[in-house]
Amino acid sequence: MQHRTTVAGFVGALALSALTIPGTAQADAFSGDIRITKVVVNGGKDIVLGTTAVKTFTIAVTAMDDSGIETGNTFPVMWHTRLPDGDRYGLVIPDNIAGTCVRQGFTTTTCTYTLKINPRIHPQDNTTAGTWTVAAHALANDGDYITKEAAARAKVLRNSVLTVNASPEPVKKNRTITVTGALTRANWKTYKYGGYATQPVKLQFKKQGTSTYKTLKTATTDSKGNLRTTTKATSDGHFRYFFAGTSTTPAVASAADHVDVK
């Protein structure tokens, strides 16, 4: 069908609008009664990027039309709008614009696409951490079409790492334990991990033989992301630090450090 030759053109048009019209909100385009009813990015989970590894994820687009959706002509693209300048950066397109499509009855089809985001290419710098925009296009068997410039939002976050060390080990009961650690996160400009300063981090303890961590206190990272606090040794168990995350950085828990109380 003639429509099958148009998908590359629609991808190119979306890419062009995303890259060459900075700070300008693009209008949706449609013809007929076709609808995009659902767009799911990465299974509903945040996309977390480190400094080197390419992240592979999916975007699933569900569209509906009385005549049915033309397979191979439903697809998404994703980018970031950086504030305060409003320019659009980091265009991410599917590996295969045909996708994998599954019909749910005659009128509705869900097409799933695989995309890859590279921390050394797409984010540009740390200001693009946070919310990204997904545009989606669909074409019906009767020629109806729709392009939604903001069909969904997705979070692209800077990966975080948290460490812990409790000492001395072993320790006498009711003596003071010093718990140190560090909270670092990916830097998309230097491609290294750096300290995350002035962040609240919970010190938690799980008593030997139990399965639940309890929060003992909250410590704050210093200017280099380091943590240091003290607590009493009351029983054998595991200490860990827990960071709840921010709008640009995911939550993370450190590995557990076992302490033997004599």
Image (tube, grey):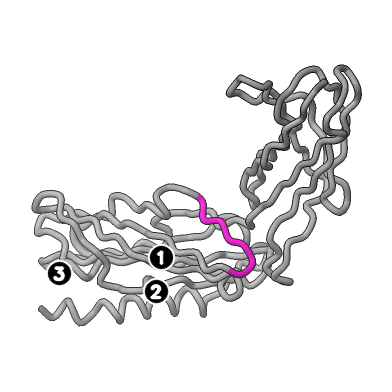
Residue identified by numbered label 1? 27
Q: First in sequence: mark 3 or mark 2?
A: 2
The earlier-in-sequence mark between 1 and 3 is 1
Task: Give the position of the C terminus as an image quadrant.
Answer: top right
Q: Position of residue 17 (x, y in %)?
A: 45, 75
C-alpha span from label 3 to label 2: 19 Å
Q: Is mark 1 on a helix, strand or loop?
A: loop
Residue farthest right in this picture: 176
Query: Which quarter of the picture shows residue 94?
Result: bottom left
Magenta residues span 46-52
Which residue corresponds to the image point at 56% horizontal and 67% vertical from the top-left? 53
Q: What residue type is labelled 3?
A: Gly
Quadrant of residue 71 within the rendered picture: bottom left
Q: Give the class, few, some or many, for how many residues have Cα within 10 Å of label 2's Cα (few <14, many ≥20).
A: many
Residue bearing mark 3: 143
Describe residue 11's horizontal placement relative to residue 231 as left or right: left
- Give the Cα separation between the discs numbered 1 and 2: 11 Å
Q: Tag 2: residue type?
A: Leu
Q: State the separation of the CA atoms marked 1 and 3.
A: 20 Å
User: Where residue 79 sits: x, y (%)?
Assistant: 50, 67
Mark 1: few, some, or many residues within 10 Å (few <14, many ≥20)?
Answer: few
Compared to residue 46, the image places residue 71 above or below, namely below
Name the residue type under label 1. Answer: Ala
Q: Which residue is drawn at 65% across and 41% down?
A: 253
Circle 3 SS class: loop
Disc 1 vs disc 3: which is toward the camera? 3
Q: Relative to residue 63, is residue 201 depicted above or below?
A: above
